[in-house]
Amino acid sequence: MQLDTRLGLTLSGGGAFGAAHVGVLQVLAERGIQPGIVTGTSSGALIGAAYAAGVDAARIEEIARRFRWSRIARWTLRPRWSLLDSHAVTGAVVALLGEDPLIEDLPRRYAAVTTDLRSRRLVAIDSGRLSTALRATMAVPGLLPPVRIGGRLLADGGMVDNVPFATARELGAERVIISRLHAKGETVRMMRTVANTAELVRDPTVVLIQPEMERMSQWSMRDVPRLIDEGRRAAEAAFAAAAE
């Protein structure tokens, strides 16, 4: 596998909508496109982590089709911070990869984007245990507990930037493929996009893929097959437009 170390891939968050990223990964594989840098938040960080670890698109699709929230979150009897506990993430990572690797040891450069709850600033985690970064980036306030890392209390990155392509730039990406989960009305109001979509469309160093999530479920897994298909459609359309 020859990675393009100057090409980044950014996957936005959005709960079950993240299944659309799987279709995007399939198109990248079919076209022989191999980003060497991956950034994401929430469900985008979850799928991006598997990809950064070298799991192929076919296996990621298989996981997505069988995924249940109970694999990464369980009810807690001590609801100080949240209704659910996310420690199951560690077991899920080990089950998939055979270990809980250090992010810096992954085949691709990787960062999970989080929000510092005290400063409300973006914090990109690009080192340390993978499961810890994933628990932080998916910590939707009230549902999943924040994670304390280096004195910071970290939670879902979507609160400050749900499309963290600037982080890919900081990791060395000169060109970035962005998969932005788009829904008319934006069903999760807390999710914030710093970059202006029109500016991304005009940027010749960016390929913007926008799967359309309208009439699909954000929190149940019933629409996963449709979401994967929509990710494929949107990726093919974006690459066709970029080639014109």
Image (cartoon, helix red, strand yellow):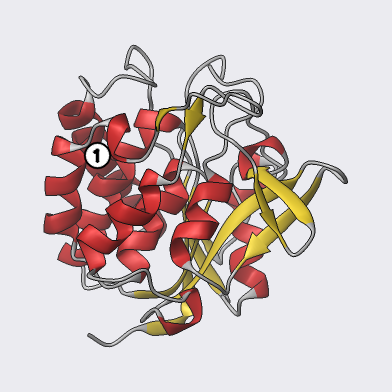
For the point 23% across and 44% down, the residue is 232
- When the figure is inspected, residue 196 is found, relative to residue 241, above or below; the finding is above
Side of 60 where 235 appears, left or right: right
Residue 234 visible:
no
Q: Residue at x 47, y 35 (%)?
A: 85
**Left or right position of 145 against 38:** right
Q: Is residue 192 above or below residue 110?
A: above
The residue type indicated by label 1 comes to Arg
Give how far across and how far down residue 33 sits, in percent: 29, 71
The foreground one among 149 and 182 is 149
Taking depth in this image into account, of 55 and 240 the one nearest to the observer is 55
Q: Classify residue 231 as left or right of residue 59.
A: right
Residue located 22% across and 70% down the image: 98
The quarter of the picture where residue 51 lies is bottom left
Outermost bottom residue: 2
Label 1: state its secondary structure. helix
The residue indicated by pointer 1 is: 233
Task: Pinpoint residue 40: horizontal percent, then vertical percent.
Answer: 51, 54
* Residue farthest toward the right in the current orientation of the protein: 119
Count the marks: how many?
Answer: 1
Q: Nearer the viewer, residue 215 or 221?
A: 221
Circle 1: is it few (<14), some (14-19), or many (20+) Cα within 10 Å?
some
Whether residue 100 is visible:
yes
**What residue do we see at 54% from left, 32% from top?**
144
Q: Work out which quarter of the rendered image holds the C terminus and state it.
A: bottom left
Instruction: Give the x, y percent position of residue 231.
Output: 28, 40
Does 243 sit above or below residue 156?
A: below
Near-viewer residue (29 or 199): 29
